[in-house]
């Protein structure tokens, strides 16, 4: 029996700086890479990667805000919304509610607890 929605997700190894190496978003595993870059973060859908700038590691809040932003881009891509010519509000809400937040809550817990 699954105790919570997060128990169904596999756990992933944690990097040296406490960030999980990957996150499950809508059934797709995205690798998380820390890089030296101009922007705070980037999501590369075809590569299934989220890139986080080294500067985003300065505080846990900045890290979580950056991850949340890039994971939201990934959620919209996984759901197909980012490929639409126009966006339907209900589709966006359902994507955020059912795809994004379960993935973000899982990674936030891992970072906050140092797992």
Image (cartoon, helix red, strand yellow):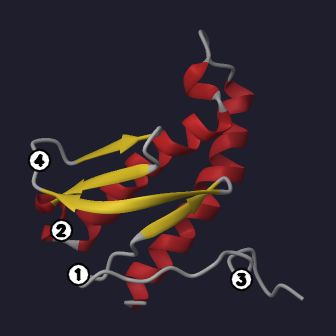
In space, the residues marked 4 and 1 are separated at their CA atoms by: 17 Å
In space, the residues marked 2 and 3 are separated at their CA atoms by: 27 Å
Q: Mark 4: which secondary structure? A: loop
Q: What residue sits right under mark 2 in the picture?
A: 57
Q: What residue sits right under mark 4 in the picture?
A: 37
Q: What residue sits right under mark 3 in the picture?
A: 7
Q: Position of residue 8 (x, y in %)?
A: 74, 77
Disc assigned to residue 17: 1
How packed mark 2 is, by other alpha carbons closer than 10 Å (few <14, some 14-19, many 20 or more), is: some
Of the numbered discs 1 and 2, the one sitting upstream in the chain is 1
In space, the residues marked 2 and 4 are separated at their CA atoms by: 12 Å
Q: Mark 1: which secondary structure? A: loop
Q: Are marks 1 and 2 in contact (CB under 8 Å)?
A: yes
Query: Horizontal placement of 83 versus 31: left or right?
Result: right
Q: Nearer the viewer, residue 62 or 48?
A: 48
Q: Mark 3: which secondary structure? A: loop
């Amino acid at each position: 029996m699954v105790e919570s929605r997060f128990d169904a997700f596999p756990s992933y190894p944690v990097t040296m700086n406490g960030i999980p190496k990957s996150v499950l978003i809508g059934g797709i595993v995205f690798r998380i890479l820390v890089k030296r870059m101009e922007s705070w973060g980037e999501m590369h859908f075809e590569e299934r990667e989220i890139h986080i700038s080294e500067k985003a590691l300065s505080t846990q809040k900045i890290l979580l805000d950056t991850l949340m932003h890039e994971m939201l881009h990934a959620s919209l891509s996984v759901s197909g919304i980012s490929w639409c010519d126009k966006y339907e509000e209900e589709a966006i809400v359902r994507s955020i509610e059912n795809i994004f937040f379960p993935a973000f809550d899982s990674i936030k817990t891992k970072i906050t607890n140092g797992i």
